[in-house]
Amino acid sequence: MSNKIKYLLSLSILFSLHSWSQGFKMNFSNSFADCFGAVEVFDFNQPSRVQFPGNYGIRDDFIELDPYFHEVNSVWLRLEPHVEGSFEFVISTENNVDFSYFLFRSSDNSFCEKLEADRVSSLLFQNSSYRTKGAADQGGEGFKGSIETKADDIFYLMIHTNSTYKGQVTVKYKRIGKLERTQSVVQDFRRNKTGKFLRVRIRDKETGEPVEANMIINGVKRDNDLFMGTDFLFDATTEKEMHIESNTKGYFLLVKDFETKDGRGKNMEILLELERLSPGKRLALQNIKFEQDSDDFLPIAYPALKRLLDFMALNSEIRIEIQGHVNAPGMENEGRIKSLSEKRAKAVRSFLKDNGIDGDRIEVKGYGNTQMIFPEPKSIKEEEANRRVEIRIID
């Protein structure tokens, strides 16, 4: 089961249990056309792109709120901007399809139940069919909404169209004012609260702030469990090695192995720094390896390819360049050398396309031996570092 599927299943289970504890009825929905299935927005530095489902989900959410409004085709987003000031958003659709939006404020997580009981009212409502010059279809920047906010405000944004259109709607965000810092929350998985421990902290590489990440750890007697949060405590490990993976929206993949045999029975602390995605940044992909002088993958490559596939699915708005590099010190970068690097990059693209990633999101380039990390490698490890596949964020 992929990290992404585990992540979504975990969210569904957690949300279901939370909804039950809040006294929700048995009306939980997985459809983002329903309030109870609203898409959770975690990263306000990136636009949200959601596809209209072509229907209104399980139920018409507005049936009690407005008898003259009938839901046809909609998406719901749940927003916690964490800003003391104001919050702006710009909505646009593919092909400039007409839509309307409703913005609601909520003080807690019982909003969807209150919506069913007709105990809410919208803060903002606009209909794009009344757009004036300067809107998205006139060359402007989009269809805007703006609202004053407190740091603990929760918002629900419903975007609706009267057609069965199944294209994308894009929402861009801007927060103005004092941003609330992400608070670290320690999740304690120790059985022995007074014994030796392993602490794992996850932080943004640039800001040092805690990052709510999803993570898999092997080597703490909970192998292949999915953990979500910023800080974790485990009983001190007796394993000789640990393996940690993180695939968190808005950040590069992180894959690390640790030797722990010298720390057995001792307190240990591991700091994981996640690098935020932005155009121009690059990442070398671990273990994407090929047969000698070939673009055929070695068996070790497939778990790494699967991680890349999950990364592309989780960050559905990015476009990347796949870069092929070979180890060929002292040789001209032409003919077989350059061709091999390009074929290997194309092999990675083919894997992604064959497994559902849009080819328009992927460019490839073979760099041959022009960007070797070690121009005169002195070990197998240095040769392996030269012989690699990287991705670069285009946009």
Image (cartoon, helix red, strand yellow):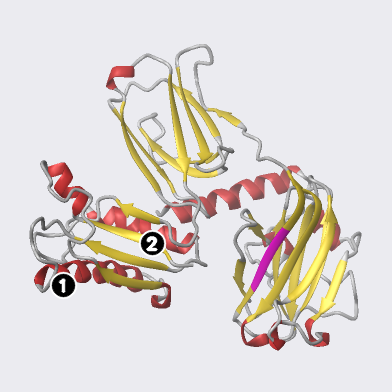
Q: Position of residue 365 (x, y in %)?
A: 28, 70
Q: Are marks 2 and 1 in contact (CB under 8 Å)?
A: no
Q: Earlier in the sequence, mark 2 or mark 1?
A: 1
**Residue 296 x %, y %:** 16, 65
Magenta includes 271?
no
Residue 130, located in which quarter of the rendered image?
bottom right
Q: Which residue is mark 2?
A: 392
Dot 2, crowdedness within 10 Å: few (<14), some or many (≥20)? many
Question: Mark 1 sits on what residue?
Answer: 339
Residue 163 visible, this angle: no
Q: Amino acid at mark 1?
A: Ser
Q: Quadrant of the N terminus?
A: bottom left
Quadrant position of residue 391: bottom left
Picture coordinates of residue 394 (x, y %)?
A: 44, 67
Locate residue 170 relative to residue 161 in the image: left or right: left
Front residue (pair 184, 237) = 184
Highlighted range, magenta:
170-174
